Image (cartoon, coloured by chain):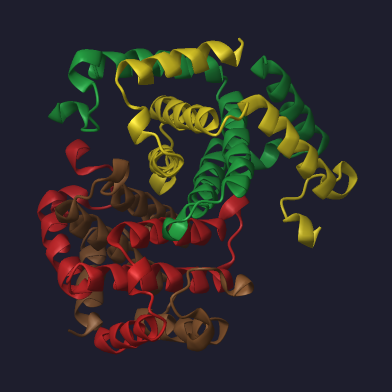
Chain colours: A brown, B red, C green, D yellow
């Protein structure tokens, strides 16, 4: 599915509620952290609640799309761009099967 | 842009490095929280570093896409589905211009 | 050790650098989240780095003490007060050996 | 107040519920991140809820004290030790009135 559909639906939702005023980059960054912790809570104490995780992941993604919009960024493009950087930091032959940081490979 | 391109590129990247073993839902949820905090750090002490924010947002999105994949979820679909729920919690006429939680509107 | 020694040392440190201006409750709360994520990073990908964890825990505690000070709260007193509330939510006989939330016990 | 009183009360509370088994360093680190985000939520959208913040700060502190205990660390001692490191990174005369990171002073 094109992500433009979700992004446009989010924009309309925000516009209809006059919520652009609350959506400063800083406030959206706080919301992403808050929702990320709610996602983490689905895995607290060694268990996992995947039904709740789906909901919380949707919340993190929603605020990420809103922040991308606010900053004039295309979500897919920045993911691909960052992947190119990560690719050069973690060459497949060196990083295979290892979880160390690139400066310890 | 279709988000399938970014998702497929991420899958190939992970597969080439045998990293599926590290990408349990719990580990990905931890990574999302960690990257979300690095994004928040761009707004610490009242300033804002939007260049760094772009990079950190890309990291949060990357882990979100990887978690969606791991849970067999379509990122756009869960965002739209959650938006429908939020829409009924925050009717436009009640929520307009207000940042209160739905149970205080 | 009395926690007054650490708190007084922190106060002097902040005062000597004129940093009270940056230590709004909100900024300190952001810093606590950021440092908490750095602590979490010591346990990413299934490993644990306890040497680094000590350092990051010190950072989280430092910002907690600064926030307590800013809000005029005694850290030990609020911990004990909250423990009383938790005690009544989680009676020993019901909660023994279980990690469920109190509303599911 | 000596922080030994709070720490001993926490230990007894955990022991009575057989909760040591859940309190691995990793699980406590996750809990600190989760509670830190609940604290941050008191400052979402530009407002501040200081009554709720007191409660959430108590939760973060509680998990910090439990983690210190689990790692055999004295909370006050590690705060003071870290402060000495920070003091040398941020000399008062260079850092006065500035919020930049030490490598940019």
| Residue C26, horizontal then vertical, whole percent | 52, 41
Give the tally of numbered discs: 0
| Residue D105, horizontal then vertical, whole percent | 81, 58
Q: Is residue D66 above or below residue D1?
A: below
Q: Which of D78 and A66 is in front in this view?
A: D78
Q: Nearer the viewer, residue C1 or C16?
A: C1
The residue drawn where x is 26% and y is 63% is A14
Is residue C95 toward the left or the right of residue D18 in the image? left
Q: Nearer the viewer, residue A99 or B62?
A: A99
Q: In this view, does B92 lie above or below D78?
A: below
Residue A18: tell me if it is visible.
Answer: no
Is residue B44 toward the left or the right of residue C37 in the image? right
Pick the quarter of the image with the C terminus of chain C: top left
Pick the quarter of the image with the N terminus of chain C: top right
Q: In this view, does C103 lie above or below C53?
A: above
Is residue D98 toward the left or the right of residue B36 in the image? right
Is residue A34 toward the left or the right of residue D103 in the image? left
Residue A61: tell me if it is visible.
Answer: yes
The residue drawn where x is 22% and y is 29% is C98
The residue drawn where x is 59% and y is 75% is A105
* Residue furthest right in the image: D93
Asked which quadrant contains residue D46, the reply is top left
| Residue C39, horizontal then vertical, whole percent | 53, 47
| Residue B48, horizontal then vertical, whole percent | 58, 61
């Amino acid at each position: 599915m094109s992500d433009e559909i979700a992004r446009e639906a989010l924009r309309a939702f925000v516009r209809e509620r006059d919520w652009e005023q609350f959506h400063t980059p800083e406030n959206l960054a706080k919301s992403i952290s808050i929702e990320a912790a709610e996602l983490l809570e689905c895995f607290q104490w060694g268990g996992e609640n995947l039904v709740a995780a789906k909901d919380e992941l949707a919340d993190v993604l929603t605020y990420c799309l809103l922040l991308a919009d606010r900053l004039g960024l295309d979500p897919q493009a920045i993911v691909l761009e960052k992947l190119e950087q990560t690719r050069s930091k973690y060459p497949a032959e060196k990083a295979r099967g290892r979880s160390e940081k690139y400066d310890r490979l």
